[in-house]
Image: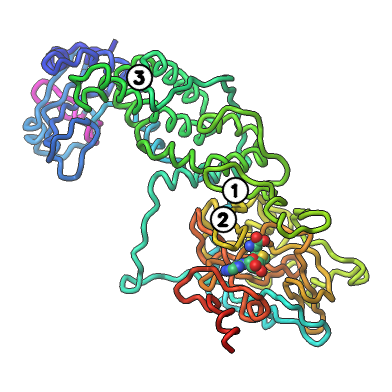
């Protein structure tokens, strides 16, 4: 046992404040603090500006006054006051090199205020985004590179192809990151720690992280309505400790369990207040904390730092998006079902197949994609085949790939002039590394029900920085289609169409906005023309949109429902009727 634990000052102060657990908590903190020879205990008084009974909650207005320090040297406990430290004339140069009065060892760093190894709880405030280049990758090459217009914009069909009724417009200008000036910068709401945490879960679900932990078959159930008994709270604490100890491989797991714990903790506080009506809220909180500490064998401060970061809002947010999380987890990481048991109902895997075969709806289970098109009454229903790459209609091009750029060097990027190869190690082109020449991960997007008359749309689950490729527009590369949505590509001499009617990827479901957050962008990878959807700055949780172009809307018998103030097509049907 460290001698500081039983120093008379510690014992006296604990007795004075009636905190009988302090010595034990101090002992366990010291036990987890590594080498013991330079430990000292700083005793502070904090002057609060209001009646704040939560010891951890301090603001910049709170004044912390050091009362003194306790330390140990040659097995003797020593005390030092702030005035003794202030009386030092020369700057302290190294550890244990200055002795004052009783020989108190002064360190060049101020002693830790809590004596706890903070390396663990520094990471608790939220998930740190995994460094996955496929997700939210920013490509910040020089502006001049980006602005090079190759002069081969995607354009409407030329004379060799009958004009399609609907065409997407593609713009080759690469969206540039603007440097906002102080005058013009619009104040933006910063994401809350819950937002960041949830984005972190999405990142992990869309990353190759695997879980290597085992889960109990049942978790202790509790009802917020009926409260939480001490026994149930103990079981939840036990579960939490188990996950905490196992969770090295998954930060998301750890925090999801913590969110569950916080909810139980709040319910336990309510129960304690019911059981002991004379308790104030602060006393009930303290009592619940103590109960938890005894099972978790953590110091109170440790517990606060590890568990009580997000408050109650996290669990309700997680429940709100539980089915969307389940779709991603079940289709990308079936092992994550176990993790999600913590936030939703226990149950078997619900969703299978391609992640985008499900249309997510807030708070209710996701719908199979085909059921959202049942009104179309197609002969075989809506059978969409998801593919990662374009499929060439060999009959249309006699076995040739019409996307191949003539006179283009396969090995050199047209944008950055760096070497392009599919080998991740030797590739030097990082223009759109989320899609080409880097490791590819599932795109962090889902289909969702727009509930605004647009039927389905695409929602970004993580943010995409401006200039990041979200996806390639893939489908059947063909020609001669008339009267259907197609993307035009190639040159007037060698045009082609990309048709997404039966095969393609999620870009098929991207809706139009008159103020889009993404745009189409032409890019050559290894000499083959690709049409990319590139972010203009897409926030996590927002719908991904592009501008379909005036010519597209010219053929569409519909009003635009983008809802933007400057919407160009909101009243077009009425305007046409009058004309
Ligand atoms: C490529 S699809 C986009 C996905 C489509 N919402 C769905 O559920 O299949 C294009 C069609 O979506 C609808 N749409 C897309 N953006 C729209 C908007 N801003 N307003 C109204 N309808 C829109 C139009 O019917 C349009 O023809």
Above or below 219: residue 24: above
Rendered residue at 18%/27% (across/down): 42
Q: Residues within 10 Å of mark 2 (few under 14, many from 20)?
A: many
Above or below 535: residue 441: above
From the viewer's side, name the closer residue of 44 and 335: 335
Rounded to the nearest angstrom, the CA distance separating label 2 from label 1 is 9 Å
Q: Is mark 1 within 8 Å of ligand 1?
A: no
Q: Which residues are magenta?
A: 97-112
Image quadrant where one finds the N terminus: top left
Mark 1 residue element = strand
Chain-order first, disc 3 or disc 1: 3
Chain-order first, disc 2 or disc 3: 3
Rounded to the nearest angstrom, the CA distance separating label 3 from label 1 is 37 Å
Q: Is mark 2 within 8 Å of ligand 1?
A: no
Q: Residues within 10 Å of mark 1 (few under 14, many from 20)?
A: many
Front position among marks 3 and 1: 1
Front position among marks 2 and 3: 2
Which circle marks residue 55 in the picture? none
Locate residue 522, reporting x and y percent.
Answer: 67, 72
From the viewer's side, name the closer residue of 290 and 522: 290
Q: Quadrant of residue 287?
A: top left
Which residue position is annotated with label 1?
Answer: 360
Q: Tell me the quadrant of ligand 1.
A: bottom right
Above or below 18: residue 573: below
Which residue position is annotated with label 3?
Answer: 292
Locate residue 45, reporting x and y percent.
Answer: 13, 31
**Residue 207 in sight:** no
Mark 2 residue element = strand
Which residue position is annotated with label 2?
Answer: 459
From the viewer's side, name the closer residue of 382 and 48: 382
Is 193 on the left or on the right of 344, as rendered?
Answer: left
Rendered residue at 29%/23% (across/down): 300
């Amino acid at each position: 046992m460290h001698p500081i634990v039983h120093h008379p000052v510690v014992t006296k102060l604990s007795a004075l404040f009636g905190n009988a657990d302090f010595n034990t908590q101090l002992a366990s903190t010291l036990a987890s603090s590594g080498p013991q020879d330079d430990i000292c205990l700083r005793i502070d008084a904090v002057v609060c500006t209001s009646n704040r009974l939560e010891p951890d909650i301090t603001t910049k207005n709170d004044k912390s006054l050091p009362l003194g320090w306790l330390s140990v040297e040659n097995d003797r406990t020593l005390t030092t006051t702030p005035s003794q430290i202030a009386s030092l004339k020369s700057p302290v140069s190294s550890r244990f090199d200055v002795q004052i009065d009783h020989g108190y060892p002064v360190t060049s760093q101020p002693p830790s205020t809590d004596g706890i190894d903070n390396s663990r709880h520094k990471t608790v405030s939220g998930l740190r985004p995994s460094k996955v280049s496929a997700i939210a990758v920013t490509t910040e090459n020089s502006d001049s590179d980006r602005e090079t217009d190759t002069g081969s914009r995607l354009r409407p069909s030329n004379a060799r192809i009958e004009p399609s009724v609907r065409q997407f417009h593609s713009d080759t200008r690469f969206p540039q990151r603007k440097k906002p000036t102080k005058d013009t910068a619009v104040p933006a709401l910063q994401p809350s720690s819950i937002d960041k945490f949830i984005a972190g879960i999405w990142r992990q679900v869309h990353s190759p992280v695997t879980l290597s932990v085992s889960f109990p078959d049942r978790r202790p159930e509790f009802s917020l309505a009926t409260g939480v008994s001490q026994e149930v709270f103990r079981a939840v604490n036990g579960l939490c400790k188990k996950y905490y100890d196992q969770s090295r491989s998954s930060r998301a797991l750890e925090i999801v369990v913590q969110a569950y714990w916080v909810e139980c903790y709040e319910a336990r506080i309510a129960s304690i207040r019911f059981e002991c009506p004379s308790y104030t809220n602060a006393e009930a909180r303290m009592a619940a904390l103590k109960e938890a500490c005894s099972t978790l064998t953590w110091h109170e401060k440790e517990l606060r730092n590890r568990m009580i970061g997000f408050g109650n809002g996290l669990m309700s947010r997680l429940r709100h998006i539980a089915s969307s999380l389940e779709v991603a987890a079940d289709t990308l990481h079936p092992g994550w079902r176990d993790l999600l048991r913590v936030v939703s109902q226990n149950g078997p895997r619900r969703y299978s197949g391609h992640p985008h075969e499900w249309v997510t709806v807030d708070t209710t289970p996701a719908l199979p994609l085909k059921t959202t098109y049942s009104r179309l009454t197609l002969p075989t229903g809506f059978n969409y085949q998801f593919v990662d790459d374009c499929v060439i209609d060999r009959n249309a091009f006699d076995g040739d790939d019409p996307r191949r750029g003539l006179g283009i060097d396969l090995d050199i990027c047209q944008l950055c002039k760096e070497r392009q190869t599919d080998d991740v190690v030797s590739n030097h082109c990082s223009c759109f590394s989320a899609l080409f020449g880097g490791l590819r991960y599932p795109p962090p997007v889902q289909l969702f029900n727009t509930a605004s008359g647009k039927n389905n749309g695409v929602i970004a689950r993580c943010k995409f920085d401006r200039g990041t490729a979200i996806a390639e527009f893939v489908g059947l590369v063909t020609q001669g289609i008339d009267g259907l949505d197609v993307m035009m590509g190639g040159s007037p001499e060698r045009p082609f169409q990309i048709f997404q009617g039966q095969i393609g990827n999620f870009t098929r479901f991207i809706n139009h906005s008159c103020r889009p957050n993404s745009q189409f962008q032409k890019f050559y990878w290894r000499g083959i023309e690709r049409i990319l959807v590139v972010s203009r700055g897409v926030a996590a949780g927002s719908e991904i949109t592009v501008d379909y172009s005036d010519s597209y809307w010219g053929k569409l018998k519909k009003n635009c429902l983008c809802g933007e103030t400057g919407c160009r097509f909101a009243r077009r049907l009425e305007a046409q009727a009058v004309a």
